[in-house]
Image (cartoon, rainbow, N blue to C red):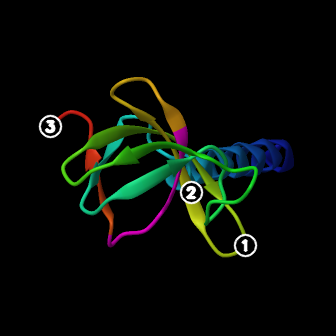
Amino acid sequence: MDKIIRYYFEKALLLLLIIASFNLFSCNAKEKIVCLQEINIMEFPEAEETKGNKIVAVLRPGDECEILDVTYSKDYAFYRVKTKDGKVGYILGDSEKMRRIPNDR
């Protein structure tokens, strides 16, 4: 009987750790970004403007946008964001050009 209890306890603990890791590494949808320097919002998560990747909008210093998701590439992290006027796109996760803030301030 003790082996069965231990087995289910270990499985429950593993499941709890998996759920906790999703919460640690996923983006909190209640966060925003405030722009410190001009930032281009791109159509796709790529570091530079290319032939197939167009600028959706430009954030100016002081502008805020909502974080919808985070995408990771080999070298970069990209935030999928939504502007106050509803435009959606990707910005490079550059800490010098932006700052993450809680949505409930």
Q: Which residue: 33% across, 66% down?
A: 97
How far is the residue under mark 3 from the one under mark 2?
A: 24 Å
Q: Are dots 3 and 2 in contact, CB under 8 Å?
A: no
Tell me the kind of residue under disc 3.
Answer: Arg
How far is the residue under mark 1 from the one under mark 3?
A: 33 Å
According to the image, label 3 marks what residue?
105
Tell me the kind of residue under disc 1.
Answer: Lys
On the rendered structure, is 36 left or right of 17? left
- The residue most toward the front is 51
The x and y percentages for residue 14 are 71, 51
Q: Which residue: 36% across, 35% down?
A: 30
On the rendered structure, is 27 left or right of 105? right
Tell me the kind of residue under disc 2.
Answer: Phe
Q: Secondary structure at mark 1?
A: loop
Q: Secondary structure at mark 2?
A: strand
Image mark for residue 78? 2
When asked about the image quadrant of residue 5, the answer is top right
Neighbour tally class for label 2: few under 14, some 14-19, many 20 plus, Cα within 10 Å? many
Q: Range of the magenta residues?
A: 89-96
Nearer-N-terminus badge (3/2): 2
According to the image, label 1 marks what residue?
74
Q: Disc 1 or disc 3, which is closer to the eye?
A: 1
Against 52, residue 72 (above or below) is below
